[in-house]
Image (cartoon, rainbow, N blue to C red):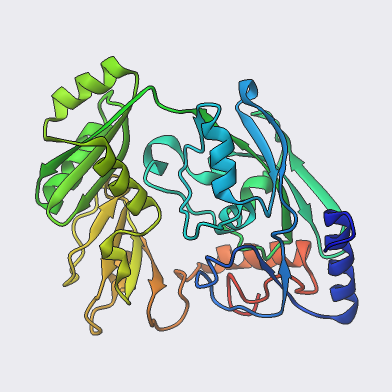
Amino acid sequence: MSGADPITALQEHIRAAAARGACLRLRGAGSKDFYGEALEGEILDLRPYQGVVHYEPSELVITARCGTPLARLEEILAAQGQFLACEPPRLSAASTLGGVVAAGLSGPRRMYAGALRDFVLGSKLLDAHGEVLRFGGEVMKNVAGFDVSRLLCGSLGILGVIAEVSLKVLPLPRAELTVRLALPAAAAVQAFNRWAGEPLPLSATAWCEGAAWVRLSGAAPAVNAARARIGGELIEAHSAHAFWSGLRDLKLPFFGQPSLWRVSLPATAPALAIDSQPLIEWGGAVRWYAAVPAEQDVRAQAILSGGTALCWRGSCEGSRFHPLSGTTLQLHRRLKQRFDPGGLFNRNRLIANL
């Protein structure tokens, strides 16, 4: 894309591929190539289309292009005492904003601050004709009708090129600390849900290897009062940061195993009948299972408890993503047909035959 305006070059590339009947594989850093059903088509490298378009710290909104490295975005925000409260996973040091939004993943703070889609205010999408479509804007409550910008979160690029995104940002907490309590998994989940019902400044909870981890963030008096209420061992700041960063970026030793399932459940759901000790986060709403015995059906267990299961890594029968109901699947097909009728973008990436 050198030698031309980046977005013009993107448009020309899209139009040329459409004219040839080709399929384009949209790619940023490639850190989430594993996340999806298939990788098909000619690679369209989106990293050259990067940079912050608009950022006024007093407005708590930043607008940036899809190829902007997430690390750079967070560096700019941190310099102004702000951050992305949904803590999207940094699966690579080169992870890009477009990839973050396309995957729609959120980190440890999601249960208490909101999901990535809750922070997306507006977007600019390049469709299969190379035309620029704009949705939302840079202020809250600016959407009338269907909120397409949030729809793009988790779409894995099947609807078009997510060229620009406007995100709501928040001030960094004035105080933050982490405590660890020795608790069985079931007792930890009960405690997480009990504390969530109280006026405590929770910002993350997790259970890992026999211990419950609780992060408190906010005004110092509220954080200190909550620490006294919850009890437990106070974790030194550097160690606490290493744990939560490892959980956010899936870098803890637990995540290094060759087989990994991510199960989403009601937060109060009892333990699943699976012979594998889980790592639990989001107050019990997400439970990771590694090295599950081959004869045990994780997805069936998740369904029995009212949840869904994603095969994050390793072999599995059928789709990696949890199968969609007939009505939901039909909605996905209609959206794909509306935005990309020729199947130009990321064919079969989110759902087979889509």
- Name which quarter of the figure residue 322 lies in: bottom left
Q: Locate the C terminus by quadrant.
A: bottom right
Q: Locate the N terminus by quadrant.
A: bottom right
From the top left corner, tell me how far across and down residue 31 is, in percent: 53, 65
- At 40% from the left edge and 84% from the top edge, which residue is drawn? 317
Residue 165 seen by the camera: yes
50 on left or right of 88: right
Residue 170, above or below 331: above
Residue 76, above or below 351: above
Residue 87, above or below 353: above
Total label count? Answer: 0
From the top left corner, tell me how far across and down residue 308 is, in percent: 38, 63
- At 21% from the left edge and 64% from the top edge, which residue is drawn? 272
203 on left or right of 192: right
From the top left corner, tell me how far across and down residue 124 is, in percent: 76, 48
Residue 233, above or below 68: above
227 on left or right of 122: left
